[in-house]
Image (cartoon, helix red, strand yellow):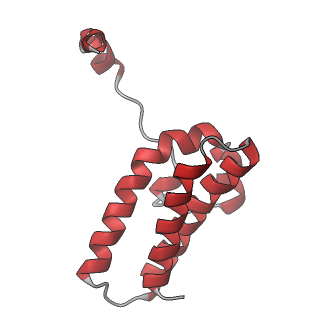
Amino acid sequence: MSLADGLDKYRNALENLKGVQKEPAQRQQQAALDVLAARDAVQHLIKDVSSIPATQLIQLDELDCHLRKQKTWIFNTIDVEHWRSLANPPEQSWWWHEPPALAPFLEKRYRWLDRLD
């Protein structure tokens, strides 16, 4: 599989997330795991390429941005710790790890912003 094919598969997996959020839990879990697996595949393909064209880097950045926006939903849908223990991804695979929590002092400091909704 080429890097372009891997990016297409990653894009399709992310697009599938939009349609499954009202589906049964099993289908949601499958879609969430498909995204993580597709991102893993892209990472493996990147390691095999000597240089990555700028267009593909930009495309990867856009897809990763979309994944970051979906991480909360993914982490609420599947037991990521369980699947991470099976997949055993390297520590650099940020998509398998929870986003850092907001520092407690920031939560207290800007709590008044919650009332502006």
- In the rendered structure, the answer to whether residue 57 lies left or right of residue 15 reads left
Rendered residue at 60%/65% (across/down)? 37
Q: Where the N terminus falls, by quadrant?
A: bottom right
Locate residue 36, reporting x and y percent: 57, 59
Q: Is residue 114 visible?
A: yes
* Residue nearer the viewer, 88 or 56: 56
In this picture, is 79 found above or below 109? below
Q: Where the C terminus falls, by quadrant?
A: top left
Rendered residue at 52%/67% (across/down)? 12
Locate residue 42, reporting x and y percent: 48, 74
- In the rendered structure, the answer to whether residue 85 lies left or right of residue 9 reads right
Q: Is residue 47 visible?
A: no
Rendered residue at 45%/60% (across/down)? 92
- In the rendered structure, the answer to whether residue 46 lies left or right of residue 44 reads left
Locate residue 105, reporting x and y percent: 30, 17
Locate residue 44, reporting x and y percent: 51, 77
How many numbered discs, if any? 0
Rendered residue at 41%/37% (across/down)? 100
Image quadrant where residue 76 sits: top right
